[in-house]
Amino acid sequence: MDISLMGFDSPFLRNIHHILEATEDNAGGNKSTNSGPTRAYVRDARAMAATPADVKEYPNSYVFVVDMPGLKSGDIKVQVEEDNVLVISGERKREHDEEEKGVKYVRMERRIGKLMRKFSLPENANTDKISAICQDGVLTVTVEKLPPPEPKKPKTIQVQVA
């Protein structure tokens, strides 16, 4: 069943749907070589689904605005993988209250764990000119565009007399 037809088309739901389909295939006695998604895949899928982002296109650049709450600039990685894939990642860890013995959490609602997003960059993105600024838990990554190619001028060839 295609979940996008039902209006549920988020990355998290697509990954959960993929996991459930793989589980159903294996439960039905189908012994395929695919044993289902790895833990890393599921962890990354959760991280991507839980990391909100905005993407803006300007005349000379693309701007990615990603919420990275509780992370310092040194805890955030911005990379470009093969095939022009921009990867933004980080991990927020639980604060250790070791000096406060006997303290227990009554409620823990703030998200801890990995934050990640992947974006396919267009062909006109200049991967040599990328800048990133983190301010107040919001990361802004700017990817400059390559200049448009200049149109070729027609070449005139002189015809010689034989």
Image (cartoon, rainbow, N blue to C red):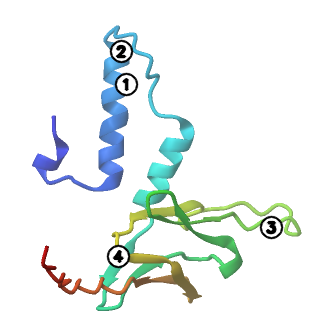
User: Do the CB atoms of the residues marked 1 and 3 lie less than 8 Å apart?
Assistant: no
Residue 27 is labelled as: 2
- Amino acid on which disc 2 is placed: Ala
First in residue order: circle 1 vs circle 3: 1
**In this orientation, does residue 83 appear?**
yes
**Tag 2 secondary structure:** helix
Q: Position of residue 28 (x, y in %)?
A: 31, 12
At 10% from the left and 47% from the top, the residue drawn is 5
Give the residue drawn at x 33%, y 32%.
Answer: 20
Camera-side residue of 124 and 74: 124
Of pointers 4 and 2, the one earlier in the residue sequence = 2
At horizontal 46% and vertical 63% (from top left) the residue drawn is: 117
Residue that carries the numbered disc 4 in the rendered image: 124
| Residue 66 % position (x, y) | 45, 76
Query: Which residue is under mark 1?
Result: 23
Q: Nearer the viewer, mark 4 or mark 2?
A: 4
